[in-house]
Amino acid sequence: MHTDLNPISLFLMAGPVVKAVMLMLVAASLWCWLIVAECILAVRRLGRAVRAGEGGRADPVIAAIFDGGAREAALVYPDEAVGARRERVVAAMRRRVQETVEAAHGGLAHLAVIASVGPFLGLFGTVWGIMTSFIGIAGSQDTSLATVAPGIAEALAATAIGLAAAIPAAFGYNQLVAAYGRLGKRLVRLVEDDAVRVLRPDGAGIAATGATR
C-alpha cells in the first residue's frame, strides 16, 4: 500500500500529542516572523532618528533624549563642579538612550525563547512519535519498512518544524541585537558630543537642594 508522505498527510497521521507539538511550532514560526518584521521596522525608525540627530535635524526621539538632559541640567546643586554637572547630565541622557532602545526592542526577547525552546519541543514530538510508532509495531508484529516508515517520518517531521521555527528566530535575534547595539552606541556618541549644548549657561535653574528626585 502506497503512503503519501507529504507534510499534510504526516500531520493527519500523527497522534494527538505530536499534532499539538506541530501546531505549537507552526504558531511559534509565524510569531517569529511577525516579531522580526516588527523589529525591522523599529530599527529603521530608530536609524532615521539617529541620522537626523547626527545631521542636526529635529526628530522627536532625539528631542525626548535631550529634553531629559535639559531637565537634569536645570537642577542646580551647590558647589557642584562643571565636570560633575556635565557627567550628571550625560548620565541622564544615557539613561534616556537606554530606555529608548529598550522600548524599540518590542518582542525581541521572544525570539530568543523560540530559538532555544523550538528544537527541544520538536525533539519531544519526535521522541513521542517514535515511541508511539514502536508500540504500534509491537502490537501489529510487523517490522517491514512500509509499516515503520510513516510513523518514523511523522515523528521526524516534528523536529524539522522545530528547526524551521528556531533557525530564523536565532538568526533574526542575533542580527537585531547587533543592530540595536550599533544604534545605541551612535546615540550615546551623539549625546556625549552634544552635551555642551545642553549645558550652556542660560541663567535658569531649579534648586535641587533638599528636593525629592
Image: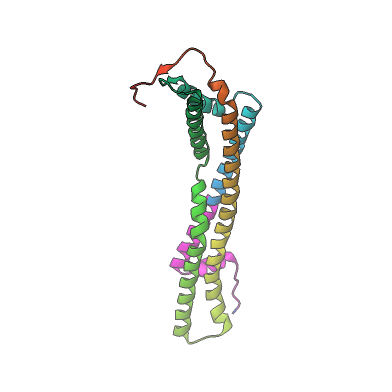
Q: Nearer the viewer, residue 195 or 52?
A: 195
- Residue 84 drawn at (x, y percent): 48, 27
Can you say which quadrant of the picture contains the C terminus? Answer: top left
Q: Which residues are magenta?
A: 2-31
- Residue 61 drawn at (x, y percent): 55, 29
Colouring scheme, one of rainbow, by chain, secondary structure, one colour:
rainbow
Residue 27 appears in view: no
Residue 125, relative to residue 26: is it above or below?
Answer: below
Can you say which quadrant of the picture contains the N terminus? Answer: bottom right
Does 148 sit left or right of 54 as displayed? left
Residue for point 60% across, 41% down:
182
- Residue 169 drawn at (x, y percent): 56, 53
Residue 60 appears in view: yes
Q: Nearer the viewer, residue 165 or 145?
A: 165
Assign the magenta stretch its main secondary structure.
helix
Residue for point 49% across, 50% down:
110
